[in-house]
Image (cartoon, rainbow, N blue to C red):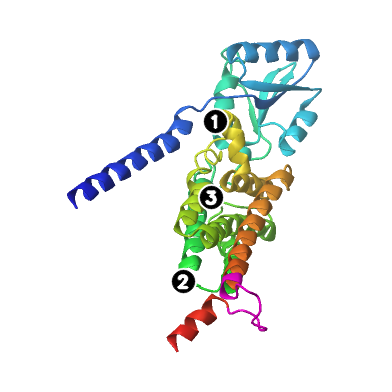
Amino acid sequence: MARRAVLLAVGVVVVQGLLILWFAWPAANLAPRDLPVVVAGPAPVATAVAGRMQQAVPGGFKITMAPDAAAADQALRDRTAYAAFVITPSGPSLHLASAASPTVAALFTQEAQQLGNGQPVPVVDVVPTPAKDPRGAGFASGFLPLLLTSAAAGAALLFAVRSHAARLVGVLLFAVLAGLVAVALLHWLGVLTGGYLLEAGAVGLLALAVSGIVSGLGAVLGLPGIGIGALLGFLLGNPISGLTAAPELLPQPWGEVGQFLPPGAAVTLLRSVAFFDGARATMPLLVLAGWGVVGLALTAVGHYRDRRRSDPAGQLGVPPMDSDERRLGAER
């Protein structure tokens, strides 16, 4: 008994250490890595500015040239860049899309002062964060409970609802309600300011992806499946989602990998529909939908596997009982 207690304590500490490393390591190594930025203005001067930036942070920026401020601002609205340095005869100015990442906006604001040669550089926020959430803290804080409750809902449905068909309905209903309620609260707090139904759809897809994969893997693999689902839907994806920074600030290739897991895809999709009129929303939409379909398919696999087990020969002549019916029959 004492040996089991020691092994359990050591095992939990090992897991704790791994989680600390995984959650803290990306945040402790934030730096620009091919961070998209536009330099706009007369070619000779703009080229010189781009060269100074590349020299100051080798490999840090993916620079695109633009002819003027209007083209640079459009790139920000299209989510093809986080910031733009606009060079005019009166001096440089910095154009931002802080709604894409307040952390990146702060980084570029500091970088801009080096271009001003001691003079303040004007800052224009083309796509700002909501007035009630200027640093994006509410967005990040409101997002984490969505991940936790979605994973918990998937596990709870697995334990509380024996029928796979009823569980499937439960996952879908949870996703719809989670999107509607969560977005209503975030709008009331002023954290989100875009189209309500589009944002609710994005949050609902996140809820479906995470709860579905936890419930589906649990239906197929049992308790280990719940752990794998939670790992994929929350533990593995959250630190590399870009929620509090941006994928291009994270160590690579993890920043890119994170965009193919539910948390990262959901962060990008929600920001796109909330602040950028849906720009660059296609890929994260497909990723979340894919995870949701996989989760629902695994739930269906568990359902039909149990039906075959209840009628292995397939010769009963009546539809096999599902899990609920077998349980009720045993009680009688």
The kind of residue tagged 3 is Gly
Q: Which residue is mark 3?
A: 233
Q: Marks 3/1: CA distance?
A: 19 Å
Which residue is more in the foreground, 255 or 146? 255
Residue, x 64% and y 14% (percent of image)? Answer: 54
The image shows residue 57 at horizontal and vertical percentages of: 58, 16
Q: Is residue 80 above or below residue 205?
A: above
Q: In the image, which residues are magenta?
A: 308-321
Residue 50 part of the magenta segment: no
Question: What residue type is disc 1 on?
Answer: Leu
Task: Find the residue positioned furthest to the left.
Answer: 2
Q: Which residue is mark 2?
A: 160
Indicate left or right for 279 with 310 as reference. right
Q: Is residue 286 left or right of residue 114?
A: right
Q: Is residue 168 left or right of residue 84?
A: left
Measured as percent of width and height from the top left, residue 172 is found at: 62, 66
Q: Which residue is mark 1?
A: 250
Counting labels gives: 3
Q: Are marks 3 and 1 in contact (CB under 8 Å)?
A: no
Q: CA distance from mark 2 to mark 3?
A: 20 Å
Q: Is residue 103 above or below residue 225?
A: above
| Residue 230 numbered tag | none
Secondary structure category for the residue under label 1: loop
Secondary-structure class at tag 3? helix
Q: Quadrant of the C terminus?
A: bottom left
Q: CA distance from mark 1 to mark 2?
A: 39 Å
